[in-house]
Amino acid sequence: MATTTTKKKSTGKRSTRKYSPAAGKSVEREMRAMKEGKLKSGRSGKKVTSRKQAIAIGLSEARKAGKKVPAKKG
């Protein structure tokens, strides 16, 4: 019986954290505020109901605070 060994191929660069833990905390805080009904959007001041919008607000605040967050697309 022949034994074969399988090697894992490296697929290019190693993955590193894209978001800092502090950025995650910022998103978590905004999600909690949204669920409590306290999160308001920018100019209009309307209540935020969308999960995606709450995440975007959290990441935006993390960027402003200088946390490690990738730049916006587009």
Image (cartoon, grey):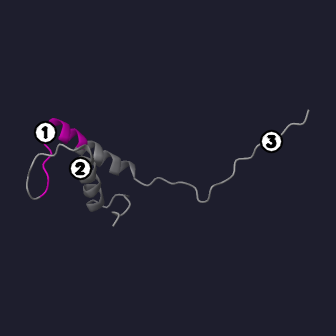
The residue under label 2 is 53
Residue 57's x, y, as percent?
A: 23, 53
Which circle's residue, 1 or 2, is located before the other in the chain?
1
Label total for image? 3
In-image side of 67 versus 1 (left or right): left
- Up-down relation of residue 50 to residue 18 (above or below): above
Identify residue type, mark 1: Gly
Residue 37 numbered tag: 1
Determine whether the residue tagged by mark 3 lies in a helix, strand or loop: loop
Q: Is residue 39 magenta?
A: yes
Determine whether the residue tagged by mark 1 lies in a helix, strand or loop: loop
In-image side of 21 versus 35 (left or right): right
Judge depth for marks 1 and 2 and give the one in front: 2
Nearest the viewer among 23 and 7 is 7
Task: Identify the magenta region.
Answer: 31-42
Q: CA distance from mark 1 to mark 2?
A: 13 Å
Q: Is residue 62 magenta?
A: no
Residue 5 numbered tag: 3
Furthest toward the top, the residue is 1
Which circle's residue, 3 or 1, is located before the other in the chain?
3
In-image side of 11 versus 61 (left or right): right
Residue 18's x, y, as percent?
A: 44, 55
Identify residue type, mark 2: Gln
